Amino acid sequence: MTAPVAFLFLGETLLIPHLYPIVEALAEAAPTLPIDLWTATSVHEQLIGRWLDEAAIASVRIRRAPGFLTLPDHGPGTNPPLPAKLPTLFRLAPRLAGARIVVCAEQTSLWLPRVLPMRARFLNVLHGAGSMMNRADRRRRAAWKTIVPAEGERAALAAHGVDPESIVVTGYVKAGFRHRTPARALFADDRPIVLYAPHWQQHRSSWWQWGARAVETVIASGRYNLIFAPHQRLAEKAPEVREVAARIAHLPHVHCDLDSFAMVDGSYTAAADLYLGDTSSQVVEFLMRPRPCVFLDPLVVAWRGDPSYAMWTAGEVVTDIAALDAALARAPAAHPRFVEAQERFARAQLGDTSGAAPARAARVILDALDD
């Protein structure tokens, strides 16, 4: 019997669109190859199971990882609580003994090849995008291969000690995710849609200083439809986010989302006409198609020339919340002077966004199986 390829869906649901397109591409390229998908919760199982059923993919088996949580009160796509990661991994290790390749999209799973004598080779798909990514973690060097979207990311990882020969540039895998939620129908009229997506880490975020006022400014203008969909983990770090969302969610020109899968599947970045944020990597996905951006800088960062803030070359940076309404109003007319910077930044971060990346990643796996 052919040894299976294992995919680990053990982290937040935001990781799924970075990994699942490779499952589909691999199943299409090798219909008889057994593929095991190890899932951490019933939320993961339900989402992925529905897509597999719709596509009638018979070679893929969904399996429950040790510590699997059945969560009947969590709807499809909500970001669920997860079982303790390290105990799950070390209990899972023996069950991966029959796999030749294990594919993961987060660093925690790389503890297995780092500390255990694993026969399986680990393929790490770099999730997310943006210039603030942590590349120095020593676990990254434990991967047999690392899939990255662009040449610049290969150079950045290599500079942090990852073997350049182990890094494969494929383009942006998530661009090939085919299960987005249609978001344009959220509103009854065709006002421009503003997406406000603050980061979840306080030192990188606009939320703690300006978040509520930013939301109020967009609503008070009367010019926009607003999608308020921050990073999944913001509500965990700043519980008052839910109070703000509850106060505005009933308004006809507001759509609040703190829990659904649409927050992470690319639906909102595809639907919006104007991006409002700070340092979230969602702006990179938004810029797959250049559109106006406004960035909030309540900490007045000395950002010019700092590669961690390269996204701020893509739009106006506001350092006074009182100036936000005017910045939003002039963003469409100002957009042409930012288009070149936006295209350059997106190309450097995402590489090819045609949707071909999953097939390239699948080819890396198939070539290894032929060795």
Image (cartoon, rainbow, N blue to C red):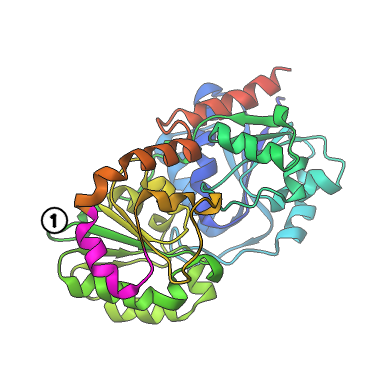
* Magenta residues, dominant SS class: helix
Residue tagged 1:
190
Q: Residue at x 44, y 50 (%)?
A: 311
Side (left or right) of 253 relative to 20: left
Quadrant for residue 30, please give it. Answer: top right
Q: Is residue 287 magenta?
A: no
Q: Is residue 21 left or right of residue 66?
A: left
- Is 33 drawn above or below residue 44 in the view shown? above
Question: What residue is at 54 percent from the left and 52 percent from the top?
Answer: 306
Q: Quadrant of the N terminus?
A: top right
Quarter-of-image position of residue 41: bottom right
Q: Residue furthest right?
A: 117
Q: Is residue 134 left or right of residue 283?
A: right
Q: Residue 151: x percent and y percent? A: 57, 31
Mark 1, other Cα within 10 Å: few <14 / some 14–19 / many ≥20: few
Give the farthest residue toward the left.
Answer: 189
- Residue 369 visible from this viewpoint: yes
Magenta span of residues:
318-331
Q: Residue 315 vs residue 309: left or right?
A: left
In the image, residue 109 sits, relative to residue 150, either above or below, namely below
As shown in the figure, which amino acid type bears the numbered disc 1? Asp
Element carrying mark 1 = loop
